[in-house]
Amino acid sequence: MDAKSTKIIVLGGGTSGWLTAALLKKQHKENIEISLIAGKESRPIGVGEATVPTLADILKILEIPESDIFRACNGTFKLAIKFTHWRKGHGSESHSFYHPFGHMPKKGLLDLSEYWLQGHLLGLPQTFAGATSMIPSLCDFFKAPRTIEEPEFTGMVEYAYHLDAGLLGPYLKNYCLKLGVRFLETEIENVALDGADGSIKYLQSRDLGNLSADLYVDCSGFRSLLLGGALKEKFYSYQKSLPCDRALATNLIENENTSHINNYTTASALQSGWAWHIPLQTRAGVGYVYSSSHLSDTEAEAEFRLFLQDTASRLDFQKIVIRAGRHERAWVKNCVAVGLAGGFVEPLESSGLAFIYTTVQAFSPHVHQFKDSPQQVAAF
């Protein structure tokens, strides 16, 4: 046990900030003092959160019951992503396919893709996902991966969740406060650097004075106030390879007469990007990710409203500017960037929470000794 607790400031009150604080406090307990700083205007990016199976590992570490997420965050099961209209079908046929979770099953020394390929060469019509996984059948018939009697985090297939991004942050906030994380509601107006080594000396707040720590975790989103702003770490843009740099997002009230909830995320190709549909218990989170160099904001909104059909006239859209790329280093001196503040690839695979978890797990073991072990920072 360390004689002195390490003081950490997490800047940013979204899902990234609260999840980071929760993981660090759960793992280090009394050996760490965490303060999370967020302003009153803090809000999540997007209106729905599709995840990958890594979230189940996170919940287990935090000892959060799976049922809590369903109740508190309007959650539903997610077994796959369904891609629609990504290539033209034959005639009027609409093309779609599932990308399910899980590893490729094996029979003997061969995985099932070999058997699908053999059937494909013989002219059999079965889809790749349908031949190698039971998940497409579960999706087609809207079945859960486990029965309600089975233990949590178990099931016949690997699965993830759909969550309300606006509810997940407050849930994690309450969780963190019970663990002893301090919440400071204030705006940061300036970042003071140490004249000797260029590290962060303190954060100047609007109404709480100067706030200092041993380690600063930047969870300030695309603004990257600490790593990109104060420390001016070089940023590499992926714009050339990933031109989709804008998004429109909103909530969609589903038809109350429907008898099912989709157990998959839908990604539908549109003129200059793609639309997501994330089904929750009482509504769906929907949005359009597009390239502003190929489509104006006005044109994108018109196309998206047409895609959503008759419900679109009553909807207001949240407009999001996407910064695809990464900083050269995510850990510089006494600052680590987590989530969007460090980098972002694209939202298609719903890997945001998984990247947060991976980042925290990588630097968490070194929070007490990093000043004396620069090789740990370099390895990270």
Image: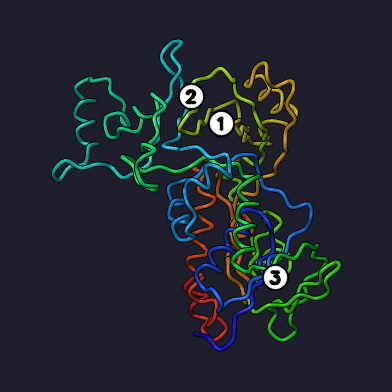
Q: Along the horizontal axis of the image, is 196 left or right of 361?
A: right
Task: Read off the residue under disc 2.
Answer: 260
Q: Nearer the viewer, residue 70 or 249?
A: 70
SS category of the residue bearing label 1 = strand
Task: Read off the residue under disc 3.
Answer: 231
Furthest-right residue in this view: 207
Residue at image position (64%, 39%) is 47
Q: Earlier in the sequence, mark 3 or mark 1?
A: 3
Q: Earlier in the sequence, mark 2 or mark 3?
A: 3
Residue at image position (36%, 38%) is 146
Mark 2 belongs to which amino acid? His
Q: Nearer the viewer, residue 279 or 119?
A: 279
Residue at image position (54%, 73%) is 29
Label 3, residues with CA under 10 Å away: few <14, some 14-19, many ≥20:
some
Q: Is residue 190 above or below residue 106?
A: below
Mark seen at residue 277:
1
Separation (CA) of disc 3 from disc 1 = 37 Å
